[in-house]
Image: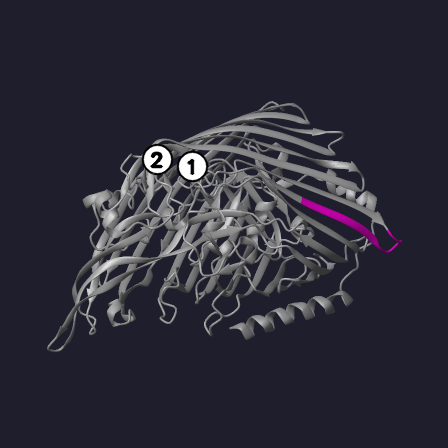
Amino acid sequence: MRTIFATSMAGVCLLAIAAPASAQTAAPQDPAASAEASQNEEIVVQARRRDESIQDVPAVVNAVTGDAIANLGLRDFTEVKDLVPGLQLSNNANGIGGNAQMRGVNFDVNASGFNATVEFYQNDAPLTAGVVLQQMYDVGQIEVVRGPQGTLRGRASPSGSIVVTTKKPDLYEIGGYVELTANNIGTMNGQGAINLPVIKGIAAIRVAGVIDQGEGNRIHSIDRTADARDPYTDARSVRVSALVEPADWLRLEGNYQRIDRFSRQFGQVESFRNVNPAAIATPVLIGPKDRLSNVARPTYLTQLFDIYNGRGEVSFGGQQLIYQFSHYTQNIDSFGNQDPANFFPATTVVQRTQSNIKSTSHELRLQNQERVFGMFDYVIGGFDYVNDTPTTLNSPTVIRLPVALGGGVATVNQTAIRRTGKSHERSFFGNVTAHIGESTEVSGGVRFISYKDDGQLYINGSLAASNAQDDDKVIYTASIKHSFSPDFMVYANTGTSYRPGISAVGDFNIARSARENSFLNLAAETSQSYEVGFKSSLFDRRVRFNASAYFQKFSNFPYRSPNGVYYVNTVAVRNAQGQVTGTAQQVGVFNFVGAVPVEVKGIELELSGNITPRWSMGVVAAYSDGKIKNGTIPCNDLNGDGKPDTSTTAPTLAALQAAVGANNLSQCNVTQRSAFQAPFSASFQTEYSVPITGHVDGYLRGLFNLNGSSQGDPTSAFDDVGSYGLLNLFVGIRAPDGQWELTAYAKNLTDEVRVLTRGNPLSTSYQQLGFGGFGPTGPILTGPTGTSADTGYVGITTTPLREFGLSFKFRFGSR
């Protein structure tokens, strides 16, 4: 497979280098005139399923263009958050999913299933975050639309949507690009594309690909055994796109993309004593700058994605019929270390997780191309989405010999877990926009959603839990806008949203309590949002100034404990032949979920434009304040005061049992933050260019991200984060017509190192056998009893590494 990817990429690069000989060369342009024209050019988006200026949309839309992605050296999709304040993007260590959160609420795919608070689309079809949050290449534009979505596109999402449009084939001109990047932290990234008209003006194909190799998070182990290998990532992808326009009334397009990724990574830790003097000492003192892990074995992850996307458009009588199809598969295989305290370094204690997900979507919609009666735009359609998510894993439990007999590992019990789940969502939607005169517009839309889900959890082959949903819901949106002039528009909008109830995965207790189940299977979430704002253009449209304010109220929002909740976990005990001989209890930890009421309020600002024809600048800022209002959440409450404890070490089984009784875990009523990221964030961009010779321009670019202070997990006194900034600088030379560009860059130039998240102290739970003396046949073993090995380390995440690198781009023809 890797040979195929390497060969494909080599072919793309060779074609890209050879093709200019047969392609027309673009005429050089005056750089000053080109820069000014670029800034004055309207950004066109499809936030409302038709082309329109971003300044005409009565909602907050952030557009990240393909040029911005290239200019700022964004290789991984998670870096898009650097350009969109208030947006957080991350991938799960197990590879099964990714997370996107915006407007003051969190999302965790392991807790909230596949109905995200921010939905992703690629080429207008829904796609899960785990597929999108990979290496980026050959992207035309990314649109981040804030606020409730669903009456116009795909699936309902309460906080917004992210729409990725890959570059389309050009029917008339050969073209493409090659880009090579290398840095001081071991990354080598090569990407490129070639565009070939097959029948000029009628049919064309575009082939693009990327190879990215490096050391990933660059976290190394303090244990330098054979298993503690250096971190490594290898990601490869190729995309083939086709476009056919045999007649003015017919357009057909489609693409196929494969992503193949392998990683070997350690989780970062630090000594808890760095922030808590009362914590136990660690064998090796580790700080955030050390970028080390205490475990001997990394997490191995293999991901393979196949994505098929197709679209057909038929135009007739001023109307347009559009069919959008998508099918994708995710094959994920991970081996995760289950000995976080590294208490059994000589024993392999890993959890293997295999997930084979298949999703298929269809959408058929009819919309106008010419206004009906000169004043109405409409969109009506239907949507169908099927998601099949089978997952298997093993959950290991170590059985330890008595200390009197050496304290070695007697055996490792494996609990077989299988989860099946299939959801089917159907919906019908419609939206009408009335243009009243030249200045006023009123719009409204509804969507009827029918959702069915059937999931089962099997433990050691026996059905342990079942969750079935059959739900119908109607959501709506409405907006009004008025343009006082061509350069100043005010608007107001409102909307509702819906997400099906979730079943959190990761608690494999074979003796669950009613309270435990209530924090695993939640009711459906609903929300109502209100937003007002204005959009304006100043100084002959060289400057944009936009502002908005919003309020959103959620019912049954799935709030997940960030650092885990301790619970009494009952596991099966097996003999040497694998037969179940009894059960035992131990301290487990899991991020349970509570359905809570949440209120969010916030503001968003944008100011961008040209200071001079050669100097551009932009600022985007966001503030969100999300709070749980008297909600019941799972918590650690060993003292029984009804308030979440600040955990400094894992409790003993006896202490936990005394606190929770038959409920297995505690619950608390709280009024607290609903999100853990900083409420305020902003990004500042600037670029200045100057001609060096008639054939060479020089430029300096800057990107500065400011993050306000954050209190992190409300139950932890040790994870607060002060405000900080990250500075990226780019300096280079380029051809005035943009044909080539050489850039030297520095990301996180000032080497800012901040701990962004800090979990509870790491511990390994296991079953301890007792020693009852010697009998006629040998030692008498008693128990086992649940216990845990504590460690003075905590898992952390930190700001990105400082990175110095070089990038070279060569473009030609249709780019």
Q: Is residue 439 above or below residue 761?
A: above
Check disc 1 and give the amino acid type: Ser
CB under 8 Å between discs 1 and 2: yes
Check disc 2 and give the amino acid type: Val
Front residue of 185 and 194: 185
Q: Residue furthest left?
A: 776
Q: Which numbered disc covers residue 674?
A: 1
Name the quadrant containing residue 96. Answer: bottom left
Q: Magenta includes 325?
A: no
* Tally of numbered discs: 2
Return the x and y of residue 445 as percentages of the image width and height: 45, 32
Return the x and y of residue 95 as percentages of the image width and height: 44, 59
Local SS, label 1 = loop
Q: Is residue 299 visible?
A: yes
Front residue of 493 and 551: 551
Could you tell whether 530 is left or right of 499 in the image?
A: right
Estimate the spatial distance between the alpha carbons at disc 1 and disc 2, rounded to whole Å.
Answer: 9 Å
Q: Magenta includes 700?
A: yes
